[in-house]
Amino acid sequence: MRRIFGAKKEEAPKPTLDETTDRLNSRGDTADAKIRALDEQLAKYKEQIKKTRPGPAQDAIKRRALQVLKQRKLYESQREQLYQQQFNLEQTRFTVDSIKDTVTSVQALKQASKEMKTAFKKNKELDIGYIENMQDEMIDMMDMAGEINEAMGRSYMVPEDVDESDLMAELDALEADLAVEDAGKEGPSYLQEPDLDLPAAPTKEAEQPAAEALKT
Protein backbone atom coordinates (compact mmCIF):
# COMPACT_ATOMS: atom_id res chain seq x y z
CA MET A 1 0.00 0.00 0.00
CA ARG A 2 2.85 2.37 0.78
CA ARG A 3 4.28 1.75 -2.70
CA ILE A 4 0.98 2.79 -4.26
CA PHE A 5 -0.05 5.76 -2.12
CA GLY A 6 3.34 6.55 -0.70
CA ALA A 7 4.35 6.90 2.95
CA LYS A 8 3.21 9.92 4.93
CA LYS A 9 5.96 12.45 5.14
CA GLU A 10 6.98 13.48 8.62
CA GLU A 11 6.50 17.16 9.29
CA ALA A 12 9.63 19.13 9.95
CA PRO A 13 9.84 20.54 13.49
CA LYS A 14 8.65 24.09 13.70
CA PRO A 15 11.32 26.67 14.49
CA THR A 16 11.43 28.02 17.98
CA LEU A 17 12.07 31.59 19.07
CA ASP A 18 15.52 30.68 20.35
CA GLU A 19 16.53 29.00 17.11
CA THR A 20 15.26 31.91 15.04
CA THR A 21 17.05 34.41 17.24
CA ASP A 22 20.33 32.49 16.95
CA ARG A 23 19.98 32.37 13.18
CA LEU A 24 19.38 36.13 13.00
CA ASN A 25 22.38 36.74 15.23
CA SER A 26 24.55 34.66 12.92
CA ARG A 27 23.35 36.59 9.88
CA GLY A 28 23.96 39.88 11.70
CA ASP A 29 27.54 38.82 12.50
CA THR A 30 28.10 37.96 8.85
CA ALA A 31 26.80 41.37 7.76
CA ASP A 32 29.06 43.11 10.27
CA ALA A 33 32.08 41.18 9.00
CA LYS A 34 31.32 42.19 5.39
CA ILE A 35 30.90 45.84 6.40
CA ARG A 36 34.29 45.82 8.16
CA ALA A 37 35.94 44.33 5.07
CA LEU A 38 34.40 47.00 2.85
CA ASP A 39 35.56 49.71 5.28
CA GLU A 40 39.11 48.44 4.90
CA GLN A 41 38.78 48.62 1.10
CA LEU A 42 37.39 52.16 1.29
CA ALA A 43 40.31 53.22 3.47
CA LYS A 44 42.77 51.84 0.89
CA TYR A 45 40.97 53.60 -1.99
CA LYS A 46 41.01 56.84 0.00
CA GLU A 47 44.79 56.63 0.36
CA GLN A 48 45.19 55.82 -3.32
CA ILE A 49 43.06 58.81 -4.33
CA LYS A 50 45.25 61.10 -2.18
CA LYS A 51 48.43 59.81 -3.80
CA THR A 52 47.10 59.81 -7.41
CA ARG A 53 46.98 62.91 -9.55
CA PRO A 54 43.64 63.98 -11.01
CA GLY A 55 42.98 62.16 -14.23
CA PRO A 56 41.76 58.85 -15.62
CA ALA A 57 43.61 56.79 -12.99
CA GLN A 58 42.10 58.70 -10.11
CA ASP A 59 38.64 58.55 -11.68
CA ALA A 60 38.90 54.76 -11.98
CA ILE A 61 39.80 54.49 -8.29
CA LYS A 62 36.85 56.70 -7.39
CA ARG A 63 34.46 54.49 -9.39
CA ARG A 64 35.68 51.39 -7.55
CA ALA A 65 35.33 53.23 -4.25
CA LEU A 66 31.77 54.25 -5.14
CA GLN A 67 30.92 50.64 -5.95
CA VAL A 68 32.28 49.49 -2.59
CA LEU A 69 30.36 52.30 -0.88
CA LYS A 70 27.12 51.13 -2.51
CA GLN A 71 27.75 47.57 -1.27
CA ARG A 72 28.41 48.94 2.18
CA LYS A 73 25.09 50.82 2.20
CA LEU A 74 23.32 47.63 1.11
CA TYR A 75 24.84 45.57 3.93
CA GLU A 76 24.05 48.31 6.45
CA SER A 77 20.41 48.27 5.35
CA GLN A 78 20.30 44.49 5.69
CA ARG A 79 21.88 44.69 9.12
CA GLU A 80 19.29 47.22 10.29
CA GLN A 81 16.52 44.91 9.11
CA LEU A 82 18.09 42.03 11.03
CA TYR A 83 18.35 44.17 14.15
CA GLN A 84 14.67 45.08 13.87
CA GLN A 85 13.68 41.44 13.46
CA GLN A 86 15.79 40.49 16.47
CA PHE A 87 14.09 43.21 18.51
CA ASN A 88 10.65 41.91 17.49
CA LEU A 89 11.64 38.38 18.47
CA GLU A 90 12.93 39.56 21.83
CA GLN A 91 9.66 41.37 22.48
CA THR A 92 7.72 38.27 21.48
CA ARG A 93 9.85 36.09 23.74
CA PHE A 94 9.31 38.49 26.64
CA THR A 95 5.54 38.38 26.08
CA VAL A 96 5.51 34.57 25.90
CA ASP A 97 7.59 34.27 29.08
CA SER A 98 5.29 36.75 30.83
CA ILE A 99 2.25 34.69 29.86
CA LYS A 100 3.90 31.51 31.15
CA ASP A 101 4.80 33.21 34.42
CA THR A 102 1.24 34.50 34.75
CA VAL A 103 -0.20 31.03 34.23
CA THR A 104 2.20 29.60 36.81
CA SER A 105 1.30 32.34 39.29
CA VAL A 106 -2.43 31.76 38.81
CA GLN A 107 -2.00 28.01 39.32
CA ALA A 108 0.00 28.62 42.50
CA LEU A 109 -2.64 31.02 43.81
CA LYS A 110 -5.38 28.52 42.97
CA GLN A 111 -3.61 25.78 44.92
CA ALA A 112 -2.99 28.12 47.85
CA SER A 113 -6.66 29.09 47.84
CA LYS A 114 -7.69 25.43 48.09
CA GLU A 115 -5.30 24.85 50.98
CA MET A 116 -6.61 27.92 52.81
CA LYS A 117 -10.23 26.83 52.39
CA THR A 118 -9.40 23.36 53.70
CA ALA A 119 -7.57 24.85 56.69
CA PHE A 120 -10.50 27.12 57.54
CA LYS A 121 -12.94 24.20 57.36
CA LYS A 122 -10.89 21.77 59.48
CA ASN A 123 -9.61 24.12 62.18
CA LYS A 124 -12.15 25.78 64.43
CA GLU A 125 -9.34 27.92 65.83
CA LEU A 126 -9.48 29.92 62.60
CA ASP A 127 -13.13 30.87 63.12
CA ILE A 128 -13.41 34.59 63.86
CA GLY A 129 -16.25 34.04 66.33
CA TYR A 130 -14.21 31.47 68.24
CA ILE A 131 -11.21 33.84 68.38
CA GLU A 132 -13.33 36.77 69.61
CA ASN A 133 -14.93 34.62 72.33
CA MET A 134 -11.52 33.42 73.41
CA GLN A 135 -10.26 37.01 73.62
CA ASP A 136 -13.29 38.01 75.72
CA GLU A 137 -12.68 35.09 78.07
CA MET A 138 -9.02 36.04 78.42
CA ILE A 139 -9.97 39.62 79.32
CA ASP A 140 -12.46 38.40 81.93
CA MET A 141 -9.90 36.04 83.46
CA MET A 142 -7.23 38.78 83.58
CA ASP A 143 -9.70 41.05 85.37
CA MET A 144 -10.51 38.29 87.84
CA ALA A 145 -6.82 37.64 88.46
CA GLY A 146 -6.26 41.34 89.12
CA GLU A 147 -9.10 41.41 91.65
CA ILE A 148 -7.73 38.31 93.36
CA ASN A 149 -4.23 39.82 93.64
CA GLU A 150 -5.70 43.02 95.04
CA ALA A 151 -7.70 41.08 97.63
CA MET A 152 -4.70 38.98 98.64
CA GLY A 153 -2.60 42.11 99.09
CA ARG A 154 -4.88 43.74 101.66
CA SER A 155 -3.52 44.46 105.19
CA TYR A 156 -5.38 43.08 108.18
CA MET A 157 -6.44 45.09 111.24
CA VAL A 158 -5.20 48.37 109.81
CA PRO A 159 -7.63 51.25 110.32
CA GLU A 160 -8.58 52.96 107.13
CA ASP A 161 -9.00 56.46 108.66
CA VAL A 162 -5.33 56.95 109.68
CA ASP A 163 -3.96 60.40 108.84
CA GLU A 164 -0.59 60.38 107.09
CA SER A 165 0.58 63.50 108.98
CA ASP A 166 -0.06 61.72 112.29
CA LEU A 167 2.03 58.79 111.14
CA MET A 168 4.92 61.10 110.18
CA ALA A 169 4.80 62.82 113.63
CA GLU A 170 4.87 59.45 115.34
CA LEU A 171 7.85 58.41 113.22
CA ASP A 172 9.78 61.58 114.19
CA ALA A 173 9.10 60.93 117.89
CA LEU A 174 10.34 57.36 117.52
CA GLU A 175 13.58 58.57 115.97
CA ALA A 176 14.10 61.03 118.89
CA ASP A 177 13.60 58.23 121.44
CA LEU A 178 16.15 56.06 119.64
CA ALA A 179 18.69 58.90 119.73
CA VAL A 180 18.23 59.29 123.50
CA GLU A 181 18.70 55.56 124.05
CA ASP A 182 21.95 55.58 122.05
CA ALA A 183 23.26 58.47 124.19
CA GLY A 184 22.43 56.58 127.40
CA LYS A 185 24.41 53.52 126.27
CA GLU A 186 27.63 55.55 126.11
CA GLY A 187 27.40 56.47 129.91
CA PRO A 188 27.59 59.81 131.71
CA SER A 189 29.95 62.46 130.44
CA TYR A 190 32.25 62.42 133.51
CA LEU A 191 33.11 58.77 132.90
CA GLN A 192 34.10 59.32 129.26
CA GLU A 193 37.73 60.00 128.33
CA PRO A 194 38.37 63.67 127.63
CA ASP A 195 39.48 64.57 124.15
CA LEU A 196 42.86 66.29 124.95
CA ASP A 197 44.97 67.70 122.18
CA LEU A 198 48.48 66.91 123.60
CA PRO A 199 51.75 67.45 121.71
CA ALA A 200 53.55 64.42 120.36
CA ALA A 201 56.43 62.82 122.32
CA PRO A 202 59.91 63.99 121.29
CA THR A 203 61.95 61.66 119.10
CA LYS A 204 65.63 60.66 119.44
CA GLU A 205 66.65 62.96 116.61
CA ALA A 206 65.16 65.92 118.48
CA GLU A 207 66.86 64.93 121.81
CA GLN A 208 70.45 64.80 120.47
CA PRO A 209 70.82 68.54 119.58
CA ALA A 210 69.45 69.47 123.04
CA ALA A 211 72.00 67.25 124.84
CA GLU A 212 74.89 68.67 122.86
CA ALA A 213 73.77 72.22 123.75
CA LEU A 214 73.89 71.38 127.48
CA LYS A 215 77.43 69.99 127.18
CA THR A 216 78.72 73.21 125.69
Image (cartoon, rainbow, N blue to C red):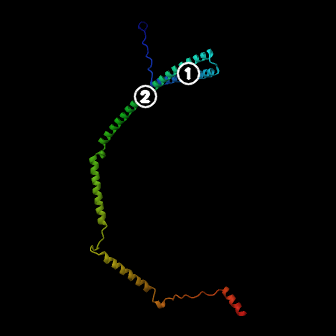
* Nearer to the camera, 39 or 54: 54
Number of numbered discs: 2
Q: Secondary structure at mark 1?
A: helix
Relative to 152, say whether 123 is above or below.
Answer: above
- Foreground of the two, 135 or 157: 135
In terms of depth relative to the viewer, which is nearer, 100 or 74?
74
Looking at the image, residue 77 sits to the left or right of residue 159; the answer is right
Residue for point 33% across, 38% down: 113
Quarter of the image with the N terminus is: top left
Q: Label for residue 49?
A: none
Residue occupying the point 67% across, 85% down: 205
Left or right of 142? Residue 58 is: right
| Residue 19 visible in rendering | no
List x then y, in percent, for residue 200: 60, 86
The amino acid on which the numbered mark 1 sits, given as a three-letter code, is Lys
What residue is pinned by disc 2?
91
Per the image, label 2 sits on a secondary structure element best described as: helix
Can you say which quadrant of the picture contains the C terminus? Answer: bottom right
Disc 1 and disc 2: Cα gap in Å?
28 Å
Residue that carries the numbered disc 1 in the rendered image:
34
Toward the right, the furthest residue is 216
